[in-house]
Amino acid sequence: MIKSLLRIIALIKKEFVAMWMDKGTRKILILPIIIQSFIFGYGASFNPEIIPFAFYDEAKSAKTTELFNDINSTLFKLTDFCYNPYCLKNSVSDGNALIGIYVKSDFEKDPKIFVIADARNTTSANIAIGYLTSIVAAFNHKHYNSEQININTRLRFNENNISRFSIMTGMILALSFIQVMLLSSFSVSREREDGTFDMLLMTPANPAEILIGKAVPPTLVAIMQGLMLFIICRFYFEIPFAGSLLNVIFILSLFSISIVSLGLAISALAKSPQQSLVFVFTLILPSIILSGMLTPISAMPAWFQSITKLNPLYYGMTALQRVYLEGQNFYEIAPLLIPLILVGLALMPLTMYLFRHKID
């Protein structure tokens, strides 16, 4: 019994030594923890650093100017000072402002403000309305006794403030991202471990043909699973669909094609399926956090928000939600699709290089 226990202890020590002596394993043990701790620490927060807002003051009185200054001196950051209601509406629709504040011309007689909130992300909208309510309450306490300012709030793109609307529509593309990364990242490393990749290189197929052959299946699977989730959102959860199904399919296809080369590059670099899995999960969690699906981007520090602009999932998810919830057409979402095209154009040559020069 004691001898058996000593043998087990010796094997455990041997495994720890082997684990630590391997350079690649040391990186896997340490780097993902450090990277994800910073990303989750700065990105997974519900407390906003700034709240972008648009303001339309039709009254132009001393009190409304003071109210504007009270709002603008806190977490709220003015993005558009509007002179008509169309500017206010467009500022919220385009995502420049999280909320739009409208003060009518008869404010002195009827102290009332109207608020339009972008409820594509219900968490962000509720936090912004909560902060605004506290500012108005302080203003009421300062200037009014019985008569107080009333806030009339209208939630756009999600009138009933149902969190499922933003989460489930975001999951359509998040699921495609996960599927593409998992399937493509195992493609080469799995065959290398099984010993079949050398046989594949002996076939008449050139690297470009091998790349295309390995890219198409995970891309099609991701598109089909994304459409399955779309059907669940539309008909089971009855989330109103305001856009075009063709635009949804196009976004799913473009995003999957853009991302599949990243998974194949990881697969070509990894020495085993286990390394591929670690690399993929190191990328998946931060990408979802930085997409704004679960936690609002406005809750991140200003310098950290710029990092989200490097995340392809942010552009794809924003475009898809605008089609699904708002009904935007292709020309309105085109600026969000350009970064996805650039990602694909940048990653494809890299993947081709790895296939030609990094495969043993």
Image: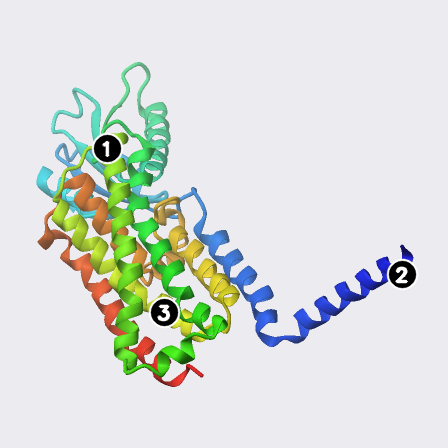
- What mark, if any, has residue 239 been given in the picture? 1
Q: Is residue 84 visible?
A: no
Q: Amino acid at mark 3?
A: Leu
Q: Position of residue 128 (x, y in %)?
A: 33, 37
Q: Are marks 3 and 1 in contact (CB under 8 Å)?
A: no
Viewer-nearest of discs 2 and 3:
2
Q: Which residue is mark 3?
A: 264
Query: Are there few (<14), some (14-19), or many (20+) residues within 10 Å of tag 3?
Result: many
x and y percentages locating residue 30 in the rendered image: 59, 65
Residue at 53% of width from left, 56% of height from top?
37
Q: Three-letter amino acid code at disc 2?
A: Lys
Mark nearer the viewer, 3 or 1: 3
Distance between the alpha carbons at the discs numbered 2 and 3: 47 Å
Residue 143 x %, y %: 31, 24
In the foreground, 357 or 99: 357
Is residue 258 shown above or below 84? below
* Spatial CA span between label 3 and label 1: 34 Å
Q: Quadrant of the N terminus?
A: bottom right
**Residue position for label 2:** 3
Front position in the image: 24 or 167: 24
Q: Is residue 195 visible?
A: yes
Q: Residues within 10 Å of mark 2 (few under 14, many from 20)?
A: few
Amino acid bearing label 1: Ile
| Helix, strand or loop status at disc 2 | helix
In the rendered image, the residue lying farthest to the bottom is 357
Provide the secondary structure element on which disc 3 rests. helix
Q: Residues within 10 Å of mark 1 (few under 14, many from 20)?
A: many
